[in-house]
């Protein structure tokens, strides 16, 4: 049995309402960093709260380290939790906040003091012990919240959109910090987010969720490159979709507005032979050789720094094309005719 | 705020308001100083303080005030906390309930209390002690709108739910959460509720009068019936007491803003 075993968890809020979480099952190994990724209302936070013990599942169970904790109160589960709103105790100093869990556990004062100092060192705020939360920036407050959750040496760390309230720059910084600390402590962690970049950059595995259900579980590489459902494909990263007529379902050959295109996978079963050909913007190249070819007109050119994003009209659809920036790059003009190409292995057919 | 700083109308209304408020007060104060014919003196105040009945009734009312405050805190902090945490939909109902003392006249309340509790099986008006229990219960009800509102506003200023969950995830039980997380962050709210409650109890007349307890309110009525200068002095004194209470609320809440902006 895995370290954390979530089995068939379903959560209904009231009669008649749809399930917030619908038959959620997942095994998490010790030391893994797992992200729950999905739009708001997809059930990711509810699932996290069930693991934390703040919500009782309507059915299903949660096992930690082989012990069924479904009926264990939240304050007896030994789970660290970090909230989007920091939730530091405003009446306590940073040191008192970090030491709170240890004082609750009736640890001797010297132990508390040493552990607090160690934690403040870990989050790189060693001199902030005497300050009050309102004297810190948002990023610093969230670090303290992290230290407070870690001080009691929890067997599991849960983070509920911890970076959503922070500026972009702090977010990236703190993201790296969270990953560093998690790896240092080899702590089993669940991270809830709606930000795909966070999930992709942090996780060992990502759980993509939609309307209470798991869409796909996999490594960031798998989730991005081999999405198994249309939802995963469109939620994680940009995706171009071409409506096509399938000409050979077995090989994945199809036709887009009179142009034959090849794809690598077999087409999903569909009665009238229509499907959508999916292709990531970065897989499209301008006037490359080989593979599939399409001709279109440039609608816009957006220079984003490391990437140049083009919008190109091909027949009835608009495609996004991402070019890696380089100094020799010649940008096409708006309204210019361009030829796009992509290899068969870069695209796949979806319903 | 700064745009209308020099608006003469503002000053006119402020002046009218101030006169309306202070002229009678000054009149009473001035009158209370003229007990000795032809000269200003504090004789009326000396007489008030010299009357053992005044000190007795003041002590009684102050004691009842403190007891009422303690009972109210013990009743309303956990109740309001629970409503915020678990039953937010019940909040409007409770808010309406706490407003009842404003709607139901005190005289109705006191007759209800007497009719219900002076009969068997309660017979609570037979001894002083049980009557005091009854009167405290009445005071708690009278101060309910102030206490509930103060605590309610204080709870809304902090994220009760998330703070509770954070404390829970760190292993804390309910009592611990209430005492070391919720209460300290409600200090100012509880203090202002307490002082208003205290002032209400000290100035209360009807409950004490009908339950025949030696409180300040009935004493003032008795004194007012037979004398001229002492009631004016008493009026100024009780006014001063209320002002001191309000002043402490102001002082503490302002000091707290500087220290901890979330504790409001």
Image (cartoon, coloured by chain):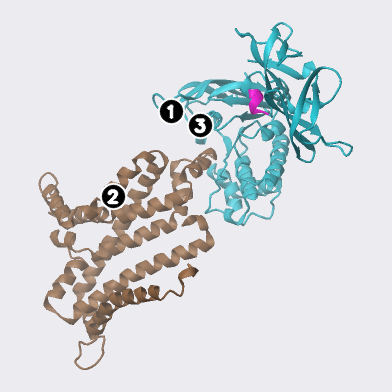
Chain colours: A cyan, B brown
Query: Which of the chains bears the disc numbered 1?
Result: A
The structure residue drawn at horizontal position 32% and vertical position 62%, both measured from the top left corner, is: B196
Q: Relative to B40, is A9 above or below?
A: above
Q: Residue furthest right?
A: A328
The crowd level at tag 2 (other Cα within 10 Å; few <14, some 14-19, many 20+) is some
Callouts 1 and 2 in the same chain: no
Reading the image, the residue beneath label 1 is A13
Reading the image, the residue beneath label 3 is A53
The structure residue drawn at horizontal position 57% and vertical position 34%, both measured from the top left corner, is: A79
Q: Relative to A225, is B104 above or below?
A: below
Q: Secondary structure at mark 1?
A: loop
The structure residue drawn at horizontal position 34% and vertical position 49%, both measured from the top left corner, is: B76
- Determine which quarter of the picture holds residue B228: bottom left
Q: State the image coordinates of residue B161 (x, y, percent, origin top left).
A: 47, 42
Labelled pair 3, 1 in contact (Cβ < 8 Å)? no
Report the magenta residues as a range. A232-236
The reply to whether the magenta stretch includes residue A233 is yes
Labelled pair 2, 3 in contact (Cβ < 8 Å)? no
Reading the image, the residue beneath label 2 is B98
As rendered, which of B135 and B27 lies closer to the eye? B27
The reply to whether the magenta stretch includes residue B48 is no
Of the 4 image quadrants, the one containing the N terminus of chain A is top right
In the image, is B249 to the left or to the right of B140? right
- Determine which quarter of the picture holds residue A175: top right
**Residue B10 visible within the image:** yes
Prevailing secondary structure class for the magenta stretch in the rendered image: helix
Query: Which of the chains bears the disc numbered 3?
Result: A
As rendered, which of A288 and A199 lies closer to the eye? A288
């Amino acid at each position: 049995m895995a370290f954390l075993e979530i089995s068939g968890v379903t959560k209904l809020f009231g009669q008649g309402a749809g399930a917030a979480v619908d038959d959620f099952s997942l095994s998490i190994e010790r030391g893994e960093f797992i992200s729950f990724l999905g739009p708001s209302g997809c059930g990711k936070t509810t699932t996290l709260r069930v693991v934390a013990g703040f919500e009782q599942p309507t059915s299903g169970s949660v096992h930690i380290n082989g012990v069924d904790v479904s009926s264990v109160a939240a304050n007896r589960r030994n789970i660290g939790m970090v909230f989007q709103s920091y939730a530091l105790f405003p009446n306590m100093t940073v040191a008192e906040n970090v030491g709170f869990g240890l004082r609750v556990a009736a640890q001797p004062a010297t132990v508390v003091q040493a552990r607090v100092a160690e934690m403040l060192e870990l989050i790189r705020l060693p001199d902030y012990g005497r300050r009050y939360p309102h004297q810190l920036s948002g990023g610093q407050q969230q670090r303290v919240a992290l230290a407070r959750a870690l001080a009691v040496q929890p067997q599991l760390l849960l983070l509920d959109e911890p970076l959503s309230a922070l500026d972009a720059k702090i977010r990236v910084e703190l993201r790296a910090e969270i990953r560093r600390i998690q790896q240092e402590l080899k702590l089993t962690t669940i991270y809830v987010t709606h930000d795909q970049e966070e999930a992709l950059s942090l996780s060992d595995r990502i759980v993509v969720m939609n309307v209470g259900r798991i869409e796909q579980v996999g490594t960031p590489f798998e989730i991005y490159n081999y999405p198994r459902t249309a939802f995963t494909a469109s939620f994680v990263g940009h995706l171009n979709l071409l409506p096509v007529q399938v000409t050979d379902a077995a090989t994945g050959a199809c036709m887009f507005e009179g142009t034959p295109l090849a794809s690598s996978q077999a087409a999903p079963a569909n009665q009238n032979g229509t499907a959508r050909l999916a292709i990531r913007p970065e897989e499209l190249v301008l006037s490359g050789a080989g593979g599939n070819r399409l001709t279109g007109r440039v609608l816009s050119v957006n220079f984003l720094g490391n990437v140049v994003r083009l919008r190109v009209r091909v027949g009835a659809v608009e495609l996004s094309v991402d070019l890696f920036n380089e100094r020799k790059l010649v940008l096409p003009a708006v309204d210019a005719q361009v030829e796009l190409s992509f290899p068969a292995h870069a695209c796949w057919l979806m319903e | 705020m700064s745009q209308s700083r020099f608006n003469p109308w503002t000053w006119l209304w402020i002046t009218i308001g101030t006169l309306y408020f202070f002229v009678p007060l000054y009149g009473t104060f001035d009158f209370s100083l003229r007990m000795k014919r032809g000269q200003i003196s504090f004789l009326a105040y000396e007489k008030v303080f010299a009357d053992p009945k005044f000190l007795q009734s003041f002590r009684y009312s102050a004691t009842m005030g403190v007891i009422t405050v303690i009972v109210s805190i013990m009743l309303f902090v956990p109740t309001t906390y629970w409503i915020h945490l678990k039953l937010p939909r019940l909040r409007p109902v409770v808010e309406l309930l706490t407003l009842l003392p404003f709607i139901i006249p005190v005289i109705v309340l006191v007759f209800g209390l007497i009719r219900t509790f002076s009969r068997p099986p309660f017979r609570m008006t037979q001894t002083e002690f049980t009557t005091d229990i009854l009167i405290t219960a009445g005071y708690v009800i009278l101060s309910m709108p102030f206490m509930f509102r103060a605590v309610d506003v204080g709870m809304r200023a902090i994220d009760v739910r998330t703070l509770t969950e954070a404390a829970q995830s760190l292993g804390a039980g309910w009592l611990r959460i209430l005492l070391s997380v919720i209460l300290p962050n409600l200090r100012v709210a509880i203090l202002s509720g307490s002082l208003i409650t205290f002032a209400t109890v000290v100035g209360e007349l009807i409950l004490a009068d009908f339950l025949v307890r030696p409180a300040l309110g009935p004493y003032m009525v008795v004194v007012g019936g037979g004398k001229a200068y002492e009631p004016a002095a008493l009026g100024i004194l009780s006014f001063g007491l209320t002002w001191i209470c309000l002043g402490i609320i102001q002082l503490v809440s302002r000091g707290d803003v500087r220290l901890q902006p979330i504790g409001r």
